[in-house]
Image (cartoon, rainbow, N blue to C red):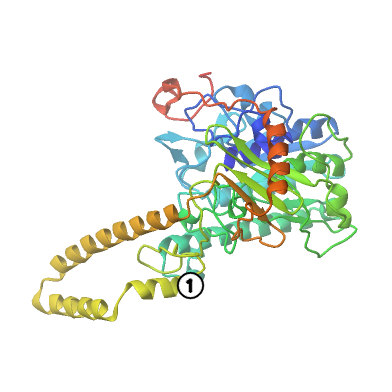
Amino acid sequence: MCTPSRTAFMTGYYPFHTGLQHGVIYPDQPKYVPGNFTFLPQKLKKLGYATHMVGKWHLGFCNKIYTPTYRGFDSFFGSYSGAGDHYTHRQYKGYDFRWNNTVYKEAKGKYSTNLFAKYAVEVIEAHDPDKQPLFMYLAFKAVHTPLQVPKKYLKRYEHIENKDRRIYSGMVTAMDEAIGKIMTALREHEYMDNLLLVFTSDNGAASYISGSSWPLRGAKTTLWEGGTRVPGLVFSKTLLKKSQYVNNELVHAVDWFPTLLAAAGGKQPQGIDGINQWRVLQSGQKSARNEFIYNIDEVKGNAAIRMGDYKLIRGGSGRYNNWYRPRLQKDCDLVYHGSGIEMEDDAIKNRKSYIMRSLSEYATSFAEKTGMKSVWNSVTSWYKKMHCARMKEEERIEERKLMQPKIQLYNIKEDPLEQHNIAKGNYHIVQKLKRRLEMYEKTLVKAIEPPTNPKARPMYQNCTWSPGWC
């Protein structure tokens, strides 16, 4: 999820070592990355870097000392919280957009992806890479809800009947275009000969809002590969000894901290969970790690560990336990049947009999001829709502059928889709991974889960989400 992953990126520590392993930071929660953790830009500043952040923060803002410009960034242009309207930049009746520490009202009515790209280009243009190295952390809000995009990006997806999936696809294209503009600026201003660019994500796709990690199992918020294994791309014209290859080595989110630090000429910080993987990425060598922790969440009561090819899950993976194809069709877009491998089109066809379709067509024609079209539209609207409610209940039933045993073991190399729990036949492997997981568990920092604070509400903060209440 958003907050735990960003914590890992910025600190190099597993979230369960910072107290941020459970859920995300809500805007009225006095929750943040504790001040004793050093952030990546703070380390890079000591190496002489200019540091800039653009986009979504989501690492706490109840006190200004937990905001970007107090945690190593020279400038910040974006939002403190984790979501919000992409045009109005409001969440829960509060405005949330900043330029450094000042509320930036000029963002109103402008699409977040375009705003972030424009500012990133301005930073690139204003900076002189020959005088000082540059670190930019750009965290787009796309493709987070609410699903919104300028109309021009929807035209190429008119063939997608499902409205949400159509918008979702447009959001990806808008982000792709924004990255293209940034790359153009980097070329025009002569950054390319010493550029290292990393593209990654904080979690797998959210199947419940039209995303898809197909064919991997699960979705965002889960410990399945579909919730945790994400796209990653590293690009450089000059710094990589091996190029144009796919790397399937074990690399965890915590590894970006020491890896980027090493690429910048820094040393591996002592005590962090991250491992320097620079040589792995640069030369295609074997991973410097053989294991990692997906998460340990004592509030949910679940955890997962990877050792070599094996993955052990204890206490269940989360709510979304099936295999979810992209939602392309209309109706309720439910495709979670049986093994989850059923084609979506077939699933929809199987639910609609020829007789029901024929009756519907006849009734529509009759209503139009007799002047009762508005009445019929009301009836069909009610029917669709009832139909969708029934389909969603079927979805819940299917999910319950996938109730998980307390201990699961998968060979990810041989079974990357996590279809075969092999725990029963591998007692010794299970015990080995359990013991290792329990060792990590002894170092866990209790999850920070403070109650919400009424003082944070926008009505007390000039209709904005602002620091100063913890």
Indicate left or right for 41 with 327 as reference: right
Most extreme residue toward the left, as rendered? 370
Q: Where does residue 360 sit, x and y in percent of width and height?
A: 22, 76
Name the residue nearer the viewer: 102 or 279. 279
User: Which quadrant of the figure has residue 232?
Assistant: bottom right
342 up-or-down from 285: above or below: below
| Mark 1 Cα shell of 10 Å, populated few (<14), some (14-19), many (≥20) | few
123 up-or-down from 368: above or below: above
Q: Is residue 148 visible?
A: no
User: Which quadrant of the figure has residue 21?
Assistant: top right
Q: Where does residue 192 sit, x and y in percent of width and height?
A: 82, 55
Element marked by disc 1: loop
Name the residue nearer the viewer: 415 or 258. 415
Indicate left or right for 95 with 45 as reference: left
38 up-or-down from 355: above or below: above
Quadrant assignment for the N terminus: top right
Residue that appears at 50% across and 59% down: 168
Q: Where does residue 313 sit, x and y in percent of width and height?
A: 61, 46
Q: Is residue 140 visible?
A: yes
Name the residue nearer the viewer: 386 or 138. 386
Q: For mark 1, what is the residue?
A: 343
Residue that appears at 46% across and 23% down: 451
389 up-or-down from 265: above or below: below
Q: Amino acid at mark 1?
A: Met
Q: How many marks?
A: 1
Q: Where does residue 281 sit, x and y in percent of width and height?
A: 83, 53
Indicate left or right for 399 with 310 as reference: left
User: Which quadrant of the figure has residue 133?
Assistant: top right
